[in-house]
Image: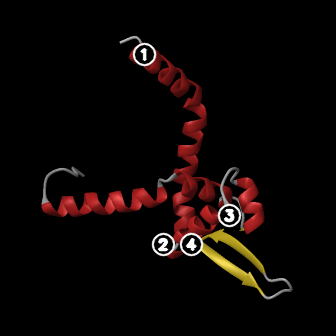
Amino acid sequence: MDLTTSTSEDTDCRAVGDILSRVGDRWTVLVVVALCDRPCRFSALRRKVGGISQQMLTSTLRTLERDGMVERTVRATTPPQVSYALTDLGRSLSDTVRQLAEWSITNLATIHDNRKRYDQQRASL
């Protein structure tokens, strides 16, 4: 699909951009990866996604739930237990996100080297 030519393609491009802005942000990717294997309670999920604040995790989970990618389940215990799991839609995204995560890990050193080289070249100008 050529996303640069027609009006319907302009609409497609905007739609793709809207979805990518949601699913492509740092925390969404990490939360989806953390939920790939099994449902998690909030505190366990926060530990798995190191460095995320409670507020950001709450916001990310609500966005994913709103988009239908995460299901929130409340068990009527004392105290109530809340767990989060990927829906079928979320699982369909998880394969792509895992590939992106694996690519990131594989290429991290090369990217850091390239950044260092670029910064050194720019500093010498």
The answer to whether residue 57 of the structure is visible from this angle is yes
Q: Amino acid at mark 3?
A: Gln
Q: Are marks 4 and 1 in contact (CB under 8 Å)?
A: no
Question: Which residue was labeled with disc 4?
Answer: 62
Is there a contact, CB below 8 Å, between mark 2 and mark 1?
Answer: no
Question: Pointer 1: what residue?
Answer: 123
Most foreground residue, 93 or 108? 108
Identify the residue shown where x is 68% and y is 63%: 54
Q: CA distance from mark 3 to mark 4?
A: 12 Å
Q: Earlier in the sequence, mark 2 or mark 4?
A: 4
Q: Is residue 102 left or right of residue 80?
A: left
Is 104 above or below relative to 28? Answer: above
Q: Which residue is mark 3?
A: 54
3 or 1: mark nearer the eye: 1
Q: Residue at x 55, y 45 (%)?
A: 99
Q: Which residue is most to the right?
A: 78
- The amino acid beneath tag 1 is Ala
Q: Which residue is mark 2?
A: 67
User: Mark 4 or 1 closer to N-term?
Assistant: 4
Q: Quadrant of residue 95?
A: bottom right
Q: Local crowd at mark 1 within 10 Å, few (<14), some, or many (≥20)?
A: few
- Residue occupying the point 21% across, 50% down: 2
State which tag comes first along the sequence, 3 or 1: 3
Q: Nearer the viewer, residue 112 or 7?
A: 112
In the picture, residue 58 is in which quadrant?
Answer: bottom right
Q: Secondary structure at mark 2?
A: loop
Q: Amino acid at mark 4?
A: Arg
